[in-house]
Image: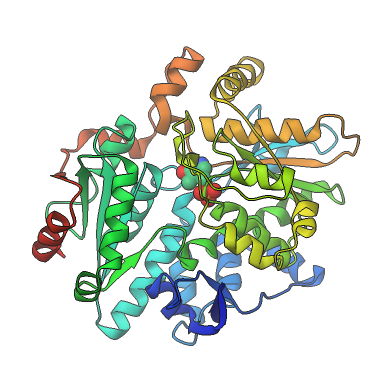
Amino acid sequence: MNYHSHSNPKVKARFGDALLASLATDGGLWMPDSLPYFNPEQTAEMGAMSFADCATFLSRKFVDERYFTDDLKTICQDAYDFDVPIVTLDGKPLDTAMPERDNDYILELFHGPTLAFKDFAARFMARAASHLMQASGETRTILVATSGDTGGAIGDAFLDQDGINVFILFPQGGVSATQEQQLCTMGRRGCNVRAIAIDGTFDDCQQLVKDAFGNKDLSQKHNLMSANSINVGRVIPQSFYYFWTSLQLKAAHGDRPLVYSIPSGNLGNLTGGLIAKKMGAPIDRFVIGNNSNDPFVDYLNTGTYRPRPSVPTLSNAMDIGRPNNFPRILNLYEGNYEAIKNICWGASFTDAETERHMRKVYNATNYIMCPHTAVGHLAMEAFCDGVETDFTKVTVGTAHPAKFSGSVERILHTDLPVPAPLVRAMRKQKRVHIMQPALDSLADYLAIHA
Ligand SMILES: *Cc1c(COP(=O)(O)O)cnc(C)c1O
C-alpha cells in the first residue's frame, strides 16, 4: 500500500516511510491511497479468527514489502496479548448476552498495559517501527507531548524496542497523580524511555515538541519522529478493533443495525472506525461524544468548522480545540458534509452532566465508567432518544476508571480497586527530569540522552 499527503496527492510514500516521517514533506497528513474492501463471505471468515489473527490479516493490506506475513503475525501476536471484551452494563460478556434483551454494550478497550485504548495503536506502531530499525540499523528519537494517556501508551509500547529512544514531555502537576506515576516509572534507569516534567502547561509541552521538529539541526541530528495521532501509524491499527468487534456483534445479533458511540478529542479513534466501515465492517452509524471542547459536534450540527482554544474538563484526554484528524475525515469523504453527516451524529456534554450520568449508571447497574466513556454513553442515549428503530448500541470504553480514580471516587463516593499494572507502577521509584519550556534545555538533554 502506498500513502499520499492529504494536501497534495502527488506527495507519496511507502507505509514504513510514512510511519517514520510522521508528516508528509508538504506538511500534510498521510492517507492510504486506497482502502481494501472485504465482502460478507470474507468478513465471515475474519470474524471467526482471533483478534490478533484478524489484525494480522488486515495489516497486510496496509504495509509495504518490507513486512512479511510472518513479521506481521509476530507483531500482532506480541502487541495484542490482552482481551478485547464487549460487556453489558451488568457485566455480562457478549457471548452470554441475550440478543432480545441486551443491546447496550461497552466495548472495553482498556485492558492493555496502560489501561487506555491508545495501547492498541501504540503497540502496533512501536513494533512496526522497530522492525524497520532492526533491518536498517538506523535509530529514531520520539518526542511526545502528553496531557496524560498518550505518553503512557507510547512509552510502554516502545519500551525496549530496538533503535528507538522516547522522550515524554508532560506538564508538571498537570496530569493525574496516577498518570504521573505511570509516566515516571516506565522501565529502568538508563532504558530507552524517559519522562520530562515541563515547568509549564500542556500547550508549552506541545509547543516545545513543535519547535524541536521545526528546528532542522535538531530534527536531523536525532531523526525525530512523532507518535501523536498525526502519525498514520497511530490511526490504521485503530480500524482493526472496529472491524473485528463489529463482526462479533453481528454474529450475536444478526441483522440488527449496529451503532458505535465514541468519546472523542483528536478524532483518531473515529477515523479508525470510519476506515473500518469503508473496508466493509457492518457498522451503520457512529455517534460522537464531545465534552465542552466540541468543534466536531458543532461541525456536524452546523456544517461549519471552527477550531478554538481548549478549556480544561473532567475528561481531560478530550480537551482538544483543534482535532488533528479532522482533515483526514474530510479527506475520507472528499469534503462532502452531507456524506459525513449521514454516518456521524454528535452531541456534547458539560462536566456536570457527565458526573450525573456516571452516578446514574453506577446506581442503576454498579458499572463504573471513566469520565470519557461516560461522555460517549451520554451521547448514545441522546442519539436513541425518540428513535424507534431497534439497534445494537456499543459505547467505546476508552480508559479504565482507575486511571482517573481521583475524580471517579469523588463522584461516585466509592473506593476503586487498583488494577495490577497500576499496583506495579505505584511500587516503583519515580525517575523524572524537570525542565523549563525552552528549546535550548531540550537540545542539551537530547545531546546527552538520545
Ligand atoms: C485519547 C483519548 C480519547 C480521545 O481519543 P481521540 O482519538 O483523540 O479522539 C478519549 N478518551 C481517552 C481516555 C483517551 O485517552
Q: Nearer the viewer, residue 136 or 169?
A: 169
Left or right: 254 as drawn, with respect to 120: right
Seen from this angle, which residue lies furthest right? 388
Q: Position of residue 212 (x, y in %)?
A: 25, 63
Q: Is residue 267 visible?
A: yes
Q: Quadrant of residue 329?
A: bottom right
- Residue 24, relative to residue 260: is it above or below? below
Seen from this angle, which residue lies furthest top? 413
Q: Position of residue 18 (x, y in %)?
A: 45, 76
Q: Position of residue 131 (x, y in %)?
A: 36, 76
Left or right: 353 as drawn, with respect to 336: left
Left or right: 418 as drawn, with respect to 443: right
Q: Nearer the viewer, residue 230 or 151?
A: 230
- Residue 340, relative to residue 363: is it above or below? below
Left or right: 105 as drawn, with respect to 237: right
Give me the residue at 37% from left, 42% from top.
147
Give me the residue at 44% from left, 15% from top.
410
Give me the residue at 47% from left, 36% from top.
400
Q: Nearer the viewer, residue 346 or 429?
A: 346
Q: Quadrant of residue 240?
A: bottom right
Image quarter where the C terminus lies is bottom left
